[in-house]
Structure formats: C-alpha cells, structure tokens
Amino acid sequence: MLATISILFWPLSGQCFRHMVAGDPPSSRREFISMSTTTRERRIVAVLASLVLSLFTLFGLSSAAMATTGNPMGDITDKPGTINVYKHANPGGTLNYGNGNEAAAAGELLGGVPFTLYKVEGVDLVNGNAGWDVVGKITDPAKPVEPALDNQNSPTKVTIDGKKYTLKKIDEKTTAGGTGLAQFTDVHPGLYIVVESKASLPPGSVIVAKAAPFFITLPIKDAKDAWSYTANVHPKNTVSPKPEKSAEVKNAADGVITWTVEQTLPTFDDTNKLTKFVMRDLLAQAGDTKGTVKSVKVTVNGDDETGAFNKELDGTDLVITAKNPDKLPSGGKIVATYTTKASGNGQFRNGVYSFINGVEVGHALAFADLGGITVAKVDSADKGLYLSGAVFKVCVDEDGVEETKDCPAVGTITTEKSLGTGSLDKLKIQKYVLFETAAPAGYTFNPDTPYKADLTTATYNTVTLTIENTKTNVPTLPLTGADGQLLMTIGGVALVLLAGGVFLVARKKRSEK
C-alpha cells in the first residue's frame, strides 16, 4: 500500500527538486476522507488515516520510505556499487537527470567534463531508518528541506534542516570522449553529492551554465522495486555555439568595410539564466576605427535593439555589452554590424570574442580585401616617355554585360605630370573596365576602347595598365628656320602681285576692243 522510492536524485539548485517514486501515499486526511461514501465510513477512514500518518511521523517515513512494517532497510547490504554519470549537451535548456536506471538519454555526449563525488558523512542507509529520515527531508514532495553547500565548486559541508554534515571527497572523474561517461566504482551505500567542475570542451561547444550539484543515494530501487547497486544519471549542460563573423565591402570605391557579428544565445531554464553578455572586437588591423562606435547597429531576433547595448572603444577594441542581459530572449540571435574605413590597399582583418556569463564561448575571424588600379600613360613610339594629363573613367565590369563608354563611373584616374601615372585605390575586389575620356595634349585616343582590370586575379590586389597614345598627325614644313619662312613669304607675295598684274592687263585689252 505504501510507496517505494526508485531513486533519490536531488539537484541543489534552489529552484527545482526532483524525485522519482513508484507511487505516492495520500498526502492528507482530507484525501483519505474523500475516498469514502458515507459519514460513518469517513470517520473510520479518518481514524485509519490518523494512525497511518502517525506511523509516518513516528518512523520518519516520507516518499523515501521503503515499507510500512518491519525494518525497511534490512535487506540492504554494505557492498560496493557503481555510479555512472553520463554528460550531455543540452541546447534545449531543460535538465533531465533520469531515474537512475536509464543507461541512455538524449543529447550530445560531452567528453572532458570533470565530476567530483562527495559522501555525506553521518548518514547511514544500511542500519535502521535514521539515514533515510535525512533523505526524506530533502525529498519530501510537500515541503522539501532546502540543502545548502558551503561551496558550490569544492564543498566541505552541507546543511540539511539546520544540521551541518561533513563531506568526504571520494573521487574525481572526467567524462570520456564519445561516451560522455564518468564512472565511479567501489562506491558503498550512502548519501552522495556529485559536483561538476568547469569543463574544457572542443571549439564550438562551450559550457556556459554547468549542471547544479545534486544528491544521489546508493543503492537505488530499480523498475522491479529491487535494490540496485548501479545508478545511471544524466546531468546536462547549457552550451553555446561560437560567434560567426563576416566582412563586406558594399561600395566599389569608398574603402568602407562593413563587419557583421552573429551570436546565438544558449537556451536557459529557470535554474540557469543569462547574467552577462559581452562581445569584444579587435579592430587593430581593421582600418581606421574613427566613427566606428557611431555606426554600430545591434538587432535581436531581427528587431533593432541598438539602445539595449553599450558600445565603446577600448583602445582599438570595440566592446558591446548588454545593459539588461536577463531581458534578452533565451536562444535568441544577436547581430551587430559596424564599419571601418580602409587606410589603403591590402587585406584587413578583425577578430571577435563572445563572453556569456563571464565564459568565453569562442571567437571568429573575418577578412576584407581592397585593391587598386594604376594607369601608366606612354608614347607609342617611345615607351620610356610617360605622359601626363590622360583621364580615364573607371566602371564595374559586370559579367555578361558589354560595357560602353556610357557606363556609370565609380571613379576617375588622371595621369600626373611627374611620373605619367595615376591610381584609384581602396577598391572592392572585383572586375573593372576603363575608358579614356581625355588624352595628353598633342596625342590622340579612342574613347570607345575598353581597358580591362581584373582585381580578382591581381597580385597583391593591384593591377597596373600601361596604355599607349599616338601623337597627333601635323603637316611637315618644307624648310625650317627664319630665312626659309621669309623666302616663302616673299615668294607668296610675288605670286599674288603677278596674278594681279596679269588680271589688269587682260582687262585693259578687253576694254580697247
């Protein structure tokens, strides 16, 4: 008629107490009375209920009681057993320790997680009921006693119902990769506490909220209500993915790099909450950071929540901190975007680190490349003669589109007087096409001729084009020097005078006729 406990497994979280029972006894006299149909029967049942409840009180039998008569612990022997701790990742955030008999549970198995087993001294589960009375106090479903550890990481004492109990460290084990198992062997009957230490996991899977310390008894009752000296438990961790980062040069020629960081938050439950969220971006090699803080935008699940975060420059680091981390949605996605200005051509990079509840959950790198186009203008007949004053329009060369001189310009290049070269820098890495719009004085050019510049295959992100110009065709003079010019001039005047005389003579002859 009375219930039997199958396992005691009690997290010391202050939030959630768990116990697994095969059946629960009536919790009150009212519940007993409600089972009868007549007043007389109710009275009889009430009396019986009083007696039963008195027995519970007398012998300290709660949900941890094993029987109603005799010595419920008489069949427990002091033989060694095993406690198997299987560690799982828990993206869903719900802790599920199991009932002590399950050898398998859902969730990614995590290796490299250390656990320490402590025995609660002075709690005897082999001889008599006194030890089980203590167990019953922390497992009472109606009003459980709140246990308290003096230290959550390496405790030496636990307080149960106002009484302090010394803890004896039994052993420390680390979960194995692949199986996620930390196995404690040669464990004698008693009340134990299992404490998880900080884990060191492979990149991309970091524990940000470890499982709370928990109680477990050995032996436990199995599914057939028999004592088992092997207990299987499945504490789970709240884990976090690492951040993701990308870089984009949106405009072809302004040198502005847009950086984007994405961080998915872990899923927390009532016992594990988000208390701190920080992203630190290292901008030392990301170009000019002036104005970066002003350009920061932060979204949470797609909604603009920029005002919910502090943004500041710490040297060359951009630090983004949640003002009220507890208000961020569990499992939500935070996306931060901001810009820097490239200082020239080359590769720019930036690394970000995410911290959740003070734990570094990972880092990510992003790269952005910018390039340039240089034009050298030379005489077609004398390749060593560099020419100034040539002007080129620079356009994006789109694949499959025939570019013409009417293409929209992203910039211009003018060759300088000193070197006969000109450049356009801080360009997005892509294909470009150039059209000459003006030639050096005394030279011809073809405005319809396209000149290709492919930065995607360029060495060191720079392309140099050498473009020739031909001199304008000028008629050659027969003689050179002042004397020749004077002679030519005189000859020309003489011819004019001679022609005029001939004309006058001819006219006079016609008039005489």
Image (cartoon, rainbow, N blue to C red):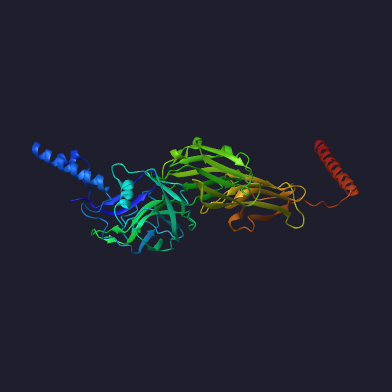
**Residue drawn 89% across and 49% down?**
481
In this view, the residue in front, 378 or 478, is 378
Location of residue 502 by image quarter: top right
Residue 499 seen by the camera = yes
Whether residue 483 is situated above or below residue 181 in the rendered picture: above
**Residue drawn 28% across and 42% down?**
142
**Residue drawn 83% across and 40% down?**
500
Indicate the quadrant containing the C terminus: top left, top right, bottom left or bottom right: top right
In this view, the residue in front, 121 or 21, is 121
Residue 359 at x, y percent in the picture: 51, 49
Residue extending farthest to the right is 483
In this view, the residue in front, 271 or 428, is 271
Q: Is residue 471 left or right of residue 449?
A: right
Whether residue 495 is situated above or below residue 116 in the rendered picture: above
Residue 202 at x, y percent in the picture: 48, 58
Tell how many labels.
0
Whether residue 312 is situated above or below residue 134 in the rendered picture: above
Residue 408 at x, y percent in the picture: 57, 44
Q: Is residue 38 left or right of residue 512?
A: left
Residue 282 at x, y percent in the picture: 59, 48
